[in-house]
Amino acid sequence: MDFLRWALPRLHMRWAGFRKVRRQLCKRLQRRLRALDLATLSDYRAYLTRVPGEWTQLDRFCRITISRFYRDREVYDHLCGPVLQTLAAAVRARDADTLKVWSAGCGRGEEPYTLAIAAHLAQPSLTDLHLQIVATDVDAALLAAGRKACYRGSSLKDLPRAWTELAFEHNQNGYCLRTPYRQGVHWIEQDIRTAMPEARFDLILCRNLVFTYFDTTLQGELLPKLIDRLEPAGVLVIGKHEVLPEDAYALAEWFPRLGIYRLSR
Ligand SMILES: C[S@@+](CC[C@H](N)C(=O)[O-])C[C@H]1O[C@@H](n2cnc3c(N)ncnc32)[C@H](O)[C@@H]1O
């Protein structure tokens, strides 16, 4: 669509990333046109030129919020098995007692909570370690939903049934995560383009955000900052269909088909 091909690069976003969610974006744009009483996207383009503040609105429309628990099963099968166990061993080896995770673009908490459930149920057990998960997102409403931790059944469709039964209580609010699995998650409202947690993490999940929607310039700026926030044996997980920028020299492939990399320096 011509309008998006014109507008997205101006927001440092890449058109290709939006191909699958174009309909959703177009619906939002049509709603905005109606609200502004504009007839066509050409009118909206002229409006953006006249009213620069509108770019902030457009940027907001470009936030895609699709997520679910245990999204991309094979990725989580690896995270819950070898990855968490290897990271736990590294934490113990440095005489620490906390495994630190950052979920960047955490949505309503589906990703950080999947990790929390996985760590609780891990075999061999990880109960000798504390799990600390920093969950960041630009959208305050999503973070509020994450704190509430009640979900529709469709959000849980990929989660192993036994996990759902153990970790959730089904009541009038939907499927609500039981308290023990909610502990240790810290929610921060942050735009990853301008702010990141000032800490080092054993595991960073940065899936279906930076390397799907942002352009290569922005990816190139953000990747070194992500790498800087990894512990020496830390692991970066990107989306299964995402590709790292070429200068990801500090990262070694671990399960590259699944977007799982580890620090190699
Ligand atoms: C497609 S969802 C992915 C959620 C989860 N990481 C996953 O893979 O299932 C993208 C998330 O990133 C958030 N997001 C979008 N732009 C952001 C930004 N600039 N900074 C931080 N979070 C952002 C959205 O609000 C949304 O929750």
Image (cartoon, rainbow, N blue to C red):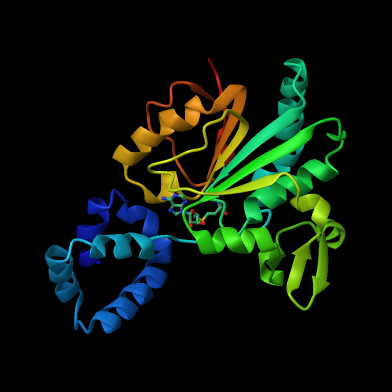
Residue 68 place in picture, x, y as percent: 63, 60
Residue visible at 38% across and 59% down in the picture:
18
Q: Is residue 66 visible?
A: no
**Label total for image:** 0
- Residue 143 drawn at (x, y percent): 57, 58
Q: Quadrant location of the N terminus?
A: bottom left
Instruction: Determine the image quadrant of residue 88.
Output: top right
Q: Picture coordinates of residue 103 (x, y %)?
A: 58, 44
Q: Is residue 234 above or below residue 104?
A: above
Q: For the point 43% across and 35% down, which residue is it?
A: 244
**In the image, 39: left or right of 256?**
left
Q: Nearer the viewer, residue 39 or 189?
A: 189
In the image, what residue occupies the spot 27% across and 52% down? 11
Task: Determine the residue positioned at 71% across, 31% down.
Answer: 99
Left or right of 204? Residue 50 is: left
Q: Is residue 119 left or right of residue 16?
A: right
Image quadrant of residue 170? bottom right
Q: Based on the displayed image, in which of its 4 quarters is residue 118 positioned?
A: top right
Compare residues 193 and 161 and report the one nearer the observer: 193
- Whether residue 60 is visible, yes or no, is yes
Above or below, comparing residue 66 to residue 248 in the picture? below
